Image (tube, rainbow, N blue to C red):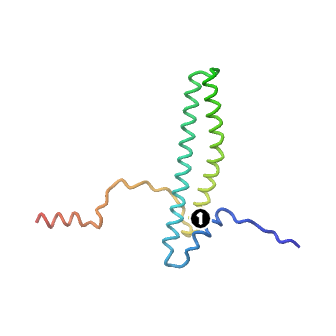
Amino acid sequence: MTKKITSPTLVDMKLAVIEFHKGDDNEYLRKSIATDACYTSFNSMEWKSEQMSKIRNKLRDLTEEGEGKEVVDINVGKNISLYRKMEPELAELQERHKADCDVYTIVTQGEVWSRRPKRTYTSDGLGDHAELQRILNA
């Protein structure tokens, strides 16, 4: 009788790395690692999508120049080839991001990751600046 060996999934492997940091003291660290992974994989997808968009725009421009011209046709061919190579890369990045989000949900016990916008305000630290000014101007 042969024993069936199943390989770990991407989620299992990523979760194992995070759970290396055991203990209640490292709960914040585990959540931070999971959050960072989500942001990193999301940004990678965005960057790849932006590259692909630039190539699509370049292909539009080239077709406006007129297909059938040798130089245009060569550039179109090169850009199509490059775009085709990027499609499976984007699919891999999407799979990675999905795994990162799944791990985040596990680590945070059900919370779903969502991208939060960057802060657009400046911090007053602990709020001391306003109080300092009030005291100094008294």
How many numbered marks, from 0 up? 1
Residue type, label 1: Val
In the displayed structure image, the side of residue 115 where residue 133 appears, left or right: left
In the displayed structure image, the side of residue 66 where residue 128 appears, left or right: left
Q: Could you say which quadrant of the image residue 9 lies in?
A: bottom right
On screen, 112 above or below 82? below
Q: Residue at x 62, y 20 (%)?
A: 69
Give the image location of residue 98, x and y in percent. Answer: 61, 57
Q: Could you say which quadrant of the image residue 85 lies in?
A: top right
Q: Residue at x 10, y 66 (%)?
A: 138
Query: Which residue is at the far left?
Result: 138
Q: Quadrant of the N terminus?
A: bottom right
Give the image location of residue 46, x and y in percent. Answer: 53, 48
Give the image location of residue 78, x and y in percent. Answer: 63, 33
Q: Residue at x 60, y 69 (%)?
A: 17
- In the image, 18 versus 82, the foreground residue is 82
On screen, 43 above or below 106? above
Identify the residue under disc 1: 103
Q: Residue at x 55, y 32 (%)?
A: 58
Q: Could you say which quadrant of the image residue 16 lies in?
A: bottom right
Give the image location of residue 106, x and y in percent. Answer: 59, 68
Secondary structure, mark 1, is: helix
Q: Residues within 10 Å of mark 1 (few under 14, many from 20)?
A: many
